[in-house]
Image (cartoon, rainbow, N blue to C red):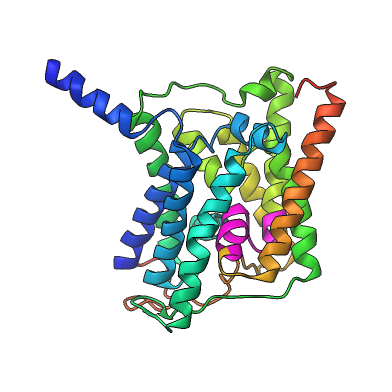
Amino acid sequence: MRLNIIGLLFGIAFGGVLAASNLHEYDTIHAMLRLDEFDVFWFMASAIAVSAPLLWLLEQRGMRTPFGGELSLSRSRPEKHHLQGGALFGVGWAIAGTCPAPALVMVSSGALLGLVAIPGIFLGLWLRERQQHGAISVGDGEHRETITADRPVGTGPTS
Amino acid sequence: MGVLEEESSIVFDIIPDRLAWYVGGPILGLLIVGLFVIANQPLGASGAYVQTAALLRRQNQIVVWRVWYFVGMFVGGILVTQVLREGAEIRSGYDALRNVFPLWATIPMVFGGATLLGYGAAVAGGCTSGHGMCGTAQRSPASMAVTATFMATAILTTLALRIVTGGDL
């Protein structure tokens, strides 16, 4: 239950930062990928520059997290599917000018074509899931089981 | 009335038309650290889509907080664009694309592009947030490979679109 509230708050904060930075606008992403404007590259780089050293430090100290046990960062080796998926993602990203999180904010901002992008993303994820016979893992490290104090994995959407 | 006007101008100062990257980027960095510190989880958006789709299809084994996270991103967008900023109007979006293509061509382009990126994110195991930022912040070689690949193909695709449209896009 508490983790759900945390998820909601982090979503609000993330969506809010994306909206405030205008990352939900096609024109922003397009100008970035045309290399007309480097703000989004700097945005991503500064987010990493802040988070990477802090995560490294916390990992060194073996920090215990309240909801997920000991902090464990995941560092997988690059495999073929990473490059294939990344290549396809990049082409789609350039055409649609949005990616999963900004597409949601696009709709919140009143841009109706976001309602075309979101079903497309769902369809793409589903096509892969079908190809894999229902098995899917998304996000680096998201294959880890999410064990929470109040709701173990597999009990369904009860909380 | 005077007080109200003053208040709204303060709000407008807090959320300017566009937040500078050196403010937004570090805030996002702290959010990434925050979710790891609290839940030992990456702040990935495509995972939220997967869990939301699973919920809508009434599957078992749903990571419910990721559905709340999905809802949160939408709410956060409303908060900033409709409440803290001057209310955004209903519009089509995609101004630069619509200057070049008519609406009947824009819709399949956006849908097709979105399908491709959704499929690609599922194959790669993450998107711009999961691999591009959280994975790279974890110093994951796989995430760095994914990020370098999608940056390269996205820039090349944009260049190709620019050439095909005679420089209009």
Give the quadrant of the C terminus of chain B: top right
Where A110 falls versus B141 (above or below)?
above
Q: On the image, which quarter does residue B19 sit in?
A: top left
Q: Quadrant of residue B134?
A: bottom right
Q: In this rendering, does residue A123 appear at all?
A: yes
Residue in the foreground of this view, choosing between A102 and B9: B9
Q: Which residues are magenta?
A: B120-136
Q: Position of residue B8 (x, y in %)?
A: 24, 24
> Residue A99 placed where, x, y %?
61, 45
The stretch drawn in magenta includes residue A133: no
Q: Nearer the viewer, residue B58 or B72?
A: B72
Residue B123 visible in the snapshot:
no
B135 in magenta: yes
The answer to whether B46 is drawn above or below residue A79 in the figure is above
> Which quarter of the picture shows residue A150?
bottom left
Q: Which residue occupies 49% across, 48% down? A: B25
- Camera-side residue: B61 or B165? B165
* For residue B99, side relative to residue B78 (left or right): right
